[in-house]
Amino acid sequence: MASPAPEVFATEAAQTMVDDGNGGAPVHVEPELWGLAPFQIVSISMLVLLLFAFFGAKVHKSLGAGIDGKIAAIKDQLEEAKQLRAEAEALRQEYADKIAGAEKDAEAMLANAQHEADAILEKAEADSKAMVERRKRMAEDKIAAAEREAVEDVRNRAVTAATTASRKLIADKHDAEADKALADQVIAGI
């Protein structure tokens, strides 16, 4: 922590009282600097100031030139600041245009991605319909093949049953004489 500021005690100015021998009344003595009273110091200071003001034209000119130089430097800095501001405004506008372009590009990319997604979805739906149709045909073909196989099996069994029944009938009803008559009939038909 900073130490507290020292306390300052104000007192009245010191006065000197001198007894000049006229009956004991004290006389007030003014302070002096180099033997001059305060009004004389003020008068000399004013004279020096006036001499400086009237005869110090070179000082005025150098002060004026210094101030003019500072003014010119400030004007140059202001011009440079204006140029920098113009450049900054141009850069800001350029980046604003780039951002707007990027936003348009992003919107176009989003629309393109949505279009591609829709196309992929439509293709997937078409492919799934084609696959379902293909599997349906395969199932129908398998069913038809199974039906043909079943019909063929039934026919084969029917033929086998008919053949067996025919053999049995022929064996039961056909004897050697019937064979001879049948053979004669076939030969005659040729």
Image (cartoon, rainbow, N blue to C red):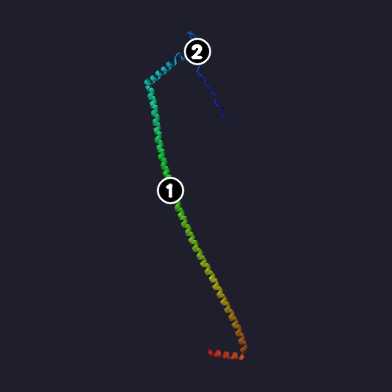
Where disc 2 sits, the SS reads strand
Task: Name the residue that disc number 1 marks.
Answer: 100
1 or 2: mark nearer the eye: 2
Where disc 1 sits, the SS reads helix
Task: Depth check: give the residue in front, 146 or 58.
Answer: 58
Quadrant containing the N terminus is: top right
Amino acid on which disc 2 is placed: Met
Could you say which quadrant of the image residue 182 lies in? Answer: bottom right
Amino acid on which disc 1 is placed: Ala
Residue 122, compared with residue 155, is above or below; it is above
Could you say which quadrant of the image residue 89 lies in? Answer: top left
Residue 50 percent location from the top left of the image: 38, 20
Residue 54, compared with residue 173, is above or below; it is above
Which residue corresponds to the image point at 50% horizontal and 62% vertical from the top-left? 125
Task: Depth check: give the residue in front, 55 or 140.
Answer: 55
Residue 122, compared with residue 12, is above or below; it is below
Task: Name the residue that disc number 2 marks.
Answer: 17
The number of numbered discs placed on residues in the rendered structure image is 2
Could you say which quadrant of the image residue 78 lies in? Answer: top left
